[in-house]
Amino acid sequence: MTWDIRPCASIEEFAEAIGVIGHYFGGWPGDLERAQQFARNLPLERVHAARDGDRIVGGAGAIPFRLTVPGGVVDCAGVTVVGVVPTHRRRGILAEMMRVQLDDVRRRGEPLAALWASEEGIYGRFGYGLASLAGEIELARSHSGLRAPRAEAARTRLVTLEEAKSVVPPIYDRVRAVTPGMFERSADWWETRNLADPPDRRDGAGEKNAVVLALDGRDAGYALYRLTQKWEAGSSIGYVTVIEAMGDEPVATREVWRFLLELDWMASVKASLLSVDHPLLHLLRYPRRMKMRLADALWCRLVDVGTALSARTYASPDPVVFEVTDAFLPENGGRWRLADGRAERTDADADLALDVSELGSVYLGGVSFGELLRADLLRELTLDAAARADAVFATGVKPWCPEIF
Ligand SMILES: CC(C)(COP(=O)(O)OP(=O)(O)OC[C@H]1O[C@@H](n2cnc3c(N)ncnc32)[C@H](O)[C@@H]1OP(=O)(O)O)[C@@H](O)C(=O)NCCC(=O)NCCS
């Protein structure tokens, strides 16, 4: 069966379409106020609704992002609010929505799509590959000491969320510029998401706090965090939840984390969505104590293989020829030669045969061809092809997406 899938044409349709995923969060179907706020970051026509008669039974959105990739920035569809009502599940609606959405993304000229998956088993079949990891930690205050002494030049100050709107975004932008996997945030995005603090999103914790770290008077780092204060047998068992913390240079990162790790009364610090190569591992005297757990973060999909591969930079101009299969978007399939940072169609013999989802995995530099080879996910057609491709795709930094969208 084929379903009637079209972009939303009114805020009421939009509210109903995003309300489908809202059902799984406990319910906000048709909530117009929430929809108006969502629409500040997600244009109405970027949400596709699946209809059964006059009822909307599925929704899938794509935020028009500018995403940092190695050596550049690309237009990227940030796939979000994907859901199908439970009465219509497993009847092919998601598959149909993904097809219509990817066709639309391609038509708009966005060469890349990216998402956070609610469940890891869903998106591989649509050509998405696991492209970055995120770490979650819980560190007891008793073992949170840093190896390096405090920087004399460092000063912290608490700011209101209103003040943060002008101070924090430029710091984020400097980190974003050099970190694959981070996306541009508009003023609306900051206001409605990162610097908003609706009481129903506090989950039992206190209000959202913002701290800014200056080095020699220059604002160089910040953290957004909450405190949860609890007492047991007369002692505090409270903890800090780090929402986001970063610095635009190593000392700033270290000192903003020192602030978080030294907060009085707090028995522990919890953080998630940390980059897999986060410097804390090397900053802490007892790194094992942060008990870092890793999980999949961004999933990437090359919507237009040639344009996407040509949009990032490479560590070497050496040629690599890929034989790509793409069952979902067959126009991507075939042989591609990457050389001097440009990817073009070719008849030359291929070095590596792989699915487009595997190209999505290596694209941001978070996964190597060697890892995929050892997982039997690609085939080497010439000697040491995976190692040669890794030398071309090498980046100095792991991708990091600090926010689920
Ligand atoms: C996940 C969800 C969107 C799937 O929608 P659906 O219309 O039932 O999916 P489809 O019938 O189109 O399934 C397409 C394929 O995906 C598979 N699939 C669907 N949901 C899956 C899941 N949660 N895990 C693994 N595979 C899944 C189906 O088995 C089918 O496989 P096939 O290609 O081998 O036939 C829907 O169940 C839902 O809304 N879940 C709760 C919200 C959610 O998780 N949304 C995703 C946010 S990232």
Image: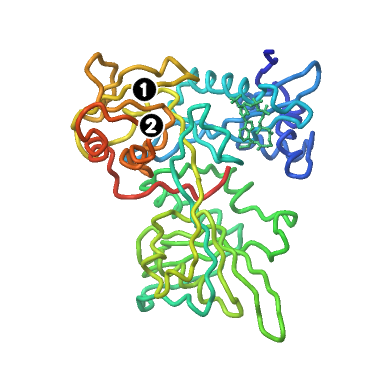
Residue visible at 57% across and 73% down? Answer: 268
Nearer-the-camera pick, 149 or 364: 364
* Residue 106 locus on image (x, y percent): 48, 20
Q: Ligand 1 is found in which quarter of the picture? A: top right
Kind of residue sitting beneath label 2: Leu
Q: Quadrant of the N terminus?
A: top right
Q: CA distance from mark 2 to mark 1?
A: 9 Å
Q: Is 120 on the left or on the right of 289, as rendered?
A: right
Q: Quadrant of residue 3?
A: top right
* Residue 165 locus on image (x, y percent): 56, 54
* Residue 261 locus on image (x, y percent): 50, 73
Nearer-the-camera pick, 277 or 180: 277
Residue visible at 24% across and 37% down? Answer: 392
Q: Is residue 362 above or below residue 217?
A: above
Residue visible at 57% across and 48% down? Answer: 190
Kind of residue sitting beneath label 1: Val
Q: Quadrant of the C terminus?
A: top right
Where disc 1 sits, the SS reads strand
Q: Are marks 2 and 1 in contact (CB under 8 Å)?
A: yes
Where disc 2 sits, the SS reads helix
* Residue 79 locus on image (x, y percent): 56, 33
Q: Which mark is residue 324?
A: 1
Q: Quadrant of residue 86?
A: top right
Q: Is 79 on the left or on the right of 385, as rendered?
A: right
Badge 2 density bin: few <14, some 14–19, many ≥20, Cα 10 Å: many
Residue visible at 61% across and 59% down? Answer: 161
Query: Ligand 1 closer than 8 Å to the CB at disc 2?
Result: no
Q: Which mark is residue 169?
A: none
Nearer-the-camera pick, 42 or 77: 77
Residue highlighted by disc 2: 359
Dot 2 or dot 1: first in sequence order is: 1
Q: Is residue 62 above or below residue 293?
A: above
